[in-house]
């Protein structure tokens, strides 16, 4: 492994340009309500597999970092969080903007995002490599156990009804079985004689179909609403004075630690992290009553926590090849498109790509800080761009992206069917994220399960092995039972209390 | 009721797929359980979850409405219909005409619905000119730079 190559992968001018484009794109998609980081990632996927690997990584990491942070702009100026990761930022950000301290609120948010993101990328540097080295001895059974556990935990820890999550997750897994069967390679499953389905569904078309386009359709309903005019005090650089940094230092660090831990856990991500960060800071505060009225700590905590999930979520994705949320699922899919094996093998086969990714996240946070510090006024203006133009243009990008996957319009046809399914799921409380994670992990689970059965003779023989794979398998079976039991107990307790 | 029909649809598809799994070709060398093993396990689990959810809905005292009628809201319905027509005619008309028409129709109509006028002459020219320029740039970027075979339609 050549460290010089890794540095050049990230610091060459073209990579930095890609990273800047990624940060700008991510921030815009993060700050406009209705658009999101996964939509931005899904839009660039069709272009990524024609790009150089390091450029693609820089672009994606830029989008990921910028997207998680971008939500603060609309959260502070409009009281509408650009993404779920900025919900808690509205609590104190908007009151500050109302008091004429919008610029200060923005500066705190941008700096907190920078601290959280940088801290978690340092943790990523330390833990991803160590964890990947530990996992190098993994065989198919261990891979199967790890992927299954990640899938189950992601489904059950995610917000919403776990049963509905299970249904969408299993539909996602079932969709991976379409096409040529792995291991034996003789059976073409559920393709109905259609040559285009022989290779199965495409992940990009699936993400655009069930995730991006339903959001566009949903927003099309409110397209007639005129956007409000927003005013912000003009400054050249939206940075925080040293005095404020000193005052908020403890909050930044607490939020960053919490965000990194939450990020590592599958199924949580930026949304719960920012709410937990806010709640924790309120508990730590000597003046908790001031929260909700424009307390700077109420912006610093959630913003550092939500950006710290970026590095945290990338730890299991890079080290074990298991994504915990929609963003990391799409990034993992992108690695597959680029022909990179993920998980511990990545450290062995592509150590430069592994470390380039880690370094790219670290640098992306600095790029994000620099760009957001000067571009806040433009971002605020972006909030006024009417959806009349935005939505049709994004739709054209989605359709063109789908065609470019296999130079075929077939992907657009099933994408259109998925739009309706995704819309009905999303609007009836069926989370779509487990479907995407199920689609990404389904193939890994089947391939490694069948390899394990071939290797050890039968499934029962696999279960009798003393291995981390067996432990993870049993956790995957027991965890849902515990979750369901706890839910029933909680419901009974609430019912008893209300009676 | 809407949710039950929606879930029942998945249930029926799952049962059909389960029956199809029996027809998969089997390799004599394969000792991994066969191509049908994994889809069958997933289908059984999915059917169990679907049945539990359907029972849950039937047992619920407060019935929740199944959200689908929002798709019929004028602006949303117009957008969705345009999208469907765009996708359907894409191959026949070709990328540039279909995309151009989609953008011109959708943007101008939504602009009118939002502001109750089409704007001044200059504004109309700039708006539509920029949209056509966008389509040409997209075509150049994907077909020219990224070598994607975009549908040529009747122009071919």
Image (cartoon, helix red, strand yellow):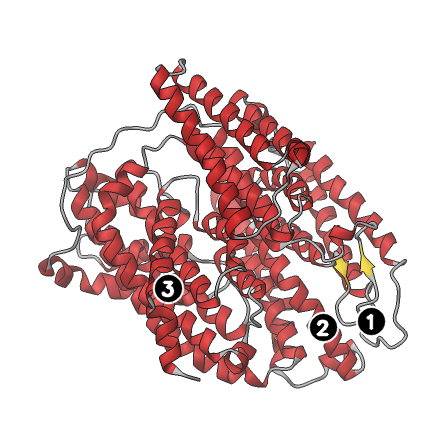
For mark 1, give the secondary structure.
Answer: loop
Q: Is residue A162 visible?
A: no
Residue A211, x across and y down, in percent: 55, 46
* Residue drawn at point x = 66 percent, y = 62 percent: A442
Q: Earlier in the sequence, mark 3 or mark 2?
A: 3
- Name which quarter of the figure residue A231 lies in: top left
Please name which of the two marks, 3 or 1, marks the residue nearer to the observer: 3
Residue at 66 percent of width and 86 percent of height: A466
Residue closest to the eye, A256 or B73: B73
Label number found at residue A449: 2
Label 3 secondary element:
helix
Structural distance between the alpha carbons of marks 3 and 1: 46 Å
> In the rendering, at what x and y percent does residue A199 appear?
72, 58
Determine whether, in the image, residue A65 is placed left or right of residue A316. left
Q: Give the spatial CA distance, label 3 vs label 2.
A: 38 Å
Which residue in the protein does label 1 denote?
Answer: B33
Give the residue pinned by disc 3. Answer: A15
The crowding category of the residue bearing disc 3, from other C-alpha atoms within 10 Å (few below 14, some 14 to 19, many at least 20), is many
- Label 2: state its secondary structure: helix
Q: Position of residue A218 (x, y in %)?
A: 51, 34
């Amino acid at each position: 492994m050549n460290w010089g190559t890794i540095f050049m992968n990230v610091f060459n001018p073209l990579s930095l340009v890609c990273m800047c484009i990624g940060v700008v794109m991510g921030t815009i998609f993060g700050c406009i309500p209705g658009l999101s980081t996964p939509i931005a990632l899904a839009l660039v996927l069709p272009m990524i597999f024609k790009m150089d690997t390091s450029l693609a990584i820089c672009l994606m990491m830029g989008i990921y970092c910028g997207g998680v942070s971008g939500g603060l702009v609309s959260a502070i100026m409009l009281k509408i969080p650009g993404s779920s990761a900025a919900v808690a930022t509205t609590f104190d950000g908007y009151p500050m903007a109302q008091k004429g301290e919008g610029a200060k609120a923005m500066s705190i948010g941008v700096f907190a995002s920078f601290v959280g993101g940088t801290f978690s990328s340092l943790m990523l540097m330390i833990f991803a490599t160590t964890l990947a080295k530990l996992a190098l001895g993994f065989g198919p059974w261990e891979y199967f156990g790890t992927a299954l556990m990640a899938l189950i935990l992601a489904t059950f820890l995610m917000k919403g009804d776990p049963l509905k999550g299970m249904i969408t997750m299993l539909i996602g897994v079932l969709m991976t079985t379409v096409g040529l069967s792995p291991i034996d390679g003789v059976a073409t499953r559920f393709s109905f004689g259609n040559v285009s389905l022989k290779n199965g569904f495409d992940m990009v078309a699936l993400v655009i179909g069930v995730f991006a386009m339903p959001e566009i359709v949903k927003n099309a309903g409110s397209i007639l609403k005129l956007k409000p005019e927003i005013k912000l005090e003009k400054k050249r650089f939206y940075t925080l004075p040293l005095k404020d940094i000193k005052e908020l230092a403890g909050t930044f660090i607490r939020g960053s630690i919490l965000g990194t831990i939450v990020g590592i856990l599958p199924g949580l991500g930026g949304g719960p992290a920012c709410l937990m960060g806010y709640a924790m800071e309120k508990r730590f505060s000597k003046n908790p009553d001031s929260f909700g009225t424009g307390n700077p700590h109420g912006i610093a905590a959630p913003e550092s926590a939500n950006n710290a999930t970026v590095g945290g979520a990338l730890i299991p994705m890079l080290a074990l090849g298991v994504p915990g949320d929609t963003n990391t699922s799409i990034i993992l899919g992108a690695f597959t498109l680029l022909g990179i094996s993920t998980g511990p093998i990545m450290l062995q086969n592509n150590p430069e790509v592994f470390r380039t990714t880690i370094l790219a996240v670290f640098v992306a946070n600095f790029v994000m800080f620099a760009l957001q510090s000067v571009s806040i006024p433009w971002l605020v203006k972006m909030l006024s761009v009417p959806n009349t133009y935005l939505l049709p243009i994004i739709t054209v990008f989605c359709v063109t992206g789908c065609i470019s996957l296999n130079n075929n319009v077939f992907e657009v046809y099933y994408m259109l069917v998925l739009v309706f399914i995704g819309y009905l799921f999303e609007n009836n409380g069926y989370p779509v994220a487990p479907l995407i994670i199920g689609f990404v992990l389904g193939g890994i689970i089947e391939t490694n399960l069948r390899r394990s059965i071939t290797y050890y003779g039968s499934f029962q023989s696999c279960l009798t092995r003393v291995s981390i794979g067996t432990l993870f398998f049993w956790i995957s079976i027991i965890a849902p039972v515990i979750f369901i039991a706890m839910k029933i107990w909680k419901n009974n307790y609430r019912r008893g209390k209300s009676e | 009721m809407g949710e039950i029909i929606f879930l029942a649809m998945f249930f029926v598809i799952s049962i059909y797929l389960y029956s199809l799994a029996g027809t998969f070709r089997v390799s004599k060398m394969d000792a991994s359980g066969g191509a049908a093993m994994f889809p069958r396990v997933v289908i059984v689990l999915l059917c169990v979850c679907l049945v539990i959810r359907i029972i849950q809905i039937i047992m619920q005292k407060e019935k929740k409405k199944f959200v689908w009628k929002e798709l019929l809201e004028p602006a949303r319905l117009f957008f969705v219909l345009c999208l469907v027509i765009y996708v359907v005619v894409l191959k026949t008309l070709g990328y540039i005409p279909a995309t151009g028409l989609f953008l011109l129709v959708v943007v101008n109509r939504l602009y009118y619905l939002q502001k109750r006028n089409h704007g001044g002459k200059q504004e109309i020219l700039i708006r539509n000119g920029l949209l056509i320029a966008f389509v040409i740039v997209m075509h150049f970027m994907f077909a020219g730079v990224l070598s994607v075979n975009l549908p040529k339609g009747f122009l071919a």
